[in-house]
Image: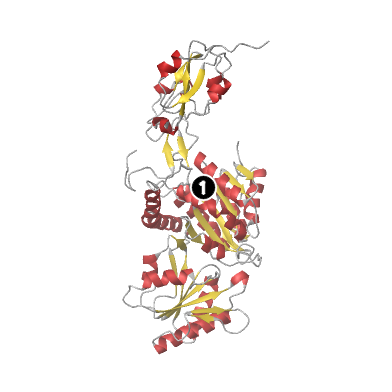
């Protein structure tokens, strides 16, 4: 945000979420919304993360558990298909990995610096149930 | 939901509380969130009864504390409604945290404060401790000396507070019991005229405007906080007085009742004057007349607008005066009275720096008698005759025991 002077902003401890008027917000996808600069959506908090989730679509069953449980609305799902993670807002809490029901999991946590291709190539095998 | 209008006589016999409650009804306040406390209880009780009887269209929110009461008012004001409540003393003290929120968020809320002492020892009677506690909170503070003024100043408060150039909350003060529970003749406005003076509430950045979503009550750190506070202070200092003055002017045209930012009585040729607030102003006015009969040119200055502090208007009102007594009705807590300090600040750089002395009086509802004021004016005249302040700068009047004086 600009560092405006004391006479250069709207009065009140108040910020606008969007630039201009919004209509039918509930049916407008995030990428189509006109977020204002003061909206936290326009700020990246990626540097809060020390571990990141990596998504392996080969095992995903699109159950949407991760989408429901993510506390930061950082699971991107379209038409009920999981398509990826919003890495600007994911804080690396690992809840998506915890709730993922597949075997092996379709989401796993790795160090922030880990190479995604390498980790996908070495994805764990299916756990054999012991009889 | 419709509401009924109320037929009022031209003059009603009302105490200050009922006068304020009637003003809230006539303003058609949308939301009152309240936690009643003596001596202000009948104000919100009155609004609740008018609401239950169908004389007002609004909501009465019963909450669990004064902190919650003001918080409810803040939420309702941010949502976009006309909002008011009332409190006193300990309740006011509990509200303080939220008072700063209301003013910082620039929400127009009208708070009727029926002035009462602060514990300990616990006391339900009138002094100005709670009013003084609010003086740095960024609110507009108007002071009524009688039920009539408590009624009138509520309309002024709504009008100024809700103005889009102002958008600052306002308190209307009256003295506990002396005004709040003393019935006097109050000249009324009919419902339409009263409402018309304030006008419809005009929302600004309201949360219920879903096409323009806003976040109220944001956090700022060292990068932005100072600018917000500077803006608020600038608006208090430059925008409020012109709006109050124009509201006073319009109110005079409407009713014939004239209010001033600083009230002056017998001040045209006064040598000695008393500055005070609340019901004491009326007592002092009477004594000043009696002193004039004895040959002492006595006058009275009453502060009508305590915040923003009328620095320039005070200087103007005190021009040519030789000796001034500032009466503070609040325990000073280790310093001269707050108003003494402020008047001193206003006068220090003036040409005719008058002889200034301070008095602490009336704590916990102790009466300020005419005899006290006769002595006081006599002391002031002695100061004039001696050409210097002959007494300590801070004296307690009306307290039992050995004479108490400092500085």
State the residue lying farthest toward the front.
A130
Residue B385 locus on image (x, y percent): 41, 89
Q: Secondary structure at mark 1?
A: helix
Residue B96 locus on image (x, y percent): 54, 55
Q: Nearer the viewer, residue A131 or B192?
A: A131
Total of numbered circles in the picture? Answer: 1
- The correct choice, above or below, for B166 with respect to B181 in the image is above
Residue A9 locus on image (x, y percent): 35, 43
- The correct choice, above or below, for A3 with respect to B160 in the image is above
In this rendering, does residue B158 appear at all?
A: no
Q: Which chain does the numbered disc 1 sit on?
A: B
Q: Residue at x 50, y 41 (%)?
A: B78
Task: Name the colour scheme.
Answer: secondary structure
Q: Is residue B156 left or right of residue B24?
A: left
In this rendering, does residue B21 appear at all?
A: yes
- The correct choice, above or below, for B271 with respect to A25 in the image is below
User: If the image is split into quadrants, where does the N terminus of chain B sit?
Assistant: top right
Q: Residue at x 46, y 37 (%)?
A: B215
**Classed neighbour count for the residue bearing mark 1: other residues with Cα under 10 Å, few (<14), some (14–19), many (≥20):** some
Which residue position holds label 1?
B195
- The correct choice, above or below, for B210 with respect to B353 in the image is above
Residue A24 locus on image (x, y percent): 46, 23
Q: Is residue B47 left or right of residue B379?
A: right
Q: Nearer the viewer, residue B281 or B75?
A: B75
Q: Residue at x 62, y 54 (%)?
A: B43
């Amino acid at each position: 945000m600009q560092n405006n002077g004391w006479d250069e902003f709207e009065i009140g401890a108040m910020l606008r979420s969007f630039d201009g008027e919004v209509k039918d917000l509930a049916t407008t996808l995030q990428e189509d919304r006109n977020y204002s600069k003061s909206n936290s959506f326009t700020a990246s908090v990626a540097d809060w993360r020390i571990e990141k989730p990596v998504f392996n679509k080969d095992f995903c069953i699109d159950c949407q558990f991760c989408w429901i449980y993510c506390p930061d609305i950082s699971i991107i799902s379209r038409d009920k298909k999981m398509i990826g993670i919003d890495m600007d807002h994911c804080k690396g809490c690992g809840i998506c990995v915890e709730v993922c029901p597949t075997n092996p999991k379709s989401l796993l946590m790795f160090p922030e610096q880990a190479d995604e291709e390498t980790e996908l190539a070495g994805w764990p095998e299916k756990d054999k149930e012991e009889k | 939901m419709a509401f009924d209008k109320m037929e009022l006589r031209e003059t009603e016999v009302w105490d200050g509380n009922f006068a304020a409650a009637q003003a809230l009804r006539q303003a058609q306040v949308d939301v009152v969130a309240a936690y009643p406390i003596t001596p202000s209880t009948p104000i919100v009780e009155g609004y609740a009864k008018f609401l239950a009887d169908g004389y007002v269209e609004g909501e009465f929110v019963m909450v669990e504390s004064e902190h919650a009461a003001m918080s409810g008012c803040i939420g309702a004001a941010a949502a976009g409604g006309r909002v008011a409540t009332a409190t006193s003393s300990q309740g006011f003290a509990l509200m303080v945290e939220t008072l700063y929120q209301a003013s910082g968020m620039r929400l127009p809320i009208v708070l009727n404060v029926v002035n009462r002492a602060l514990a300990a020892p616990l006391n339900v009677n009138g002094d100005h401790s709670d009013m003084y506690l609010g003086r740095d909170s960024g609110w507009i503070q108007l002071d009524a000396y009688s039920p009539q003024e408590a009624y009138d100043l509520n309309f002024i408060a709504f009008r100024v507070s809700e103005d889009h150039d102002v958008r600052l909350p306002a308190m209307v003060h009256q003295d506990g019991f002396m005004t709040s529970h003393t019935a006097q003749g109050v000249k009324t406005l009919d419902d339409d005229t009263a409402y018309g003076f304030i006008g419809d509430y005009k929302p600004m950045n309201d949360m219920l405007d879903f096409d323009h979503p806003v976040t109220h009550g944001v956090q700022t750190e060292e990068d932005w906080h100072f600018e917000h506070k500077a803006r608020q202070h600038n608006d208090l200092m430059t925008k409020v007085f012109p709006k109050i003055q124009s509201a006073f002017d319009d109110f005079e045209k409407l009713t014939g009742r004239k209010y001033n930012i600083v009230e002056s009585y017998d001040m045209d040729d006064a040598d000695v004057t008393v500055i005070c607030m609340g019901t004491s102003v009326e007592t002092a006015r009477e004594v000043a007349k009696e002193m004039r009969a004895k040959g002492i040119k006595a006058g009275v200055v009453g502060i009508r607008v305590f915040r923003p502090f009328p620095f320039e208007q005070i200087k103007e009102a005190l021009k040519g005066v030789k000796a001034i007594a500032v009466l503070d009705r609040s325990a000073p807590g280790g310093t001269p009275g707050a108003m003494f300090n402020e008047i001193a600040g206003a006068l220090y750089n003036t040409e005719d720096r008058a002889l200034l002395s301070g008095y602490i009086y009336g704590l916990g509802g102790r009466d300020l008698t005419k005899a006290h004021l006769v002595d006081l004016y006599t002391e002031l005249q002695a100061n004039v005759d001696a050409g210097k302040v002959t007494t300590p700068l801070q004296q307690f009047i009306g307290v039992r025991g050995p004479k108490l004086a400092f500085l």
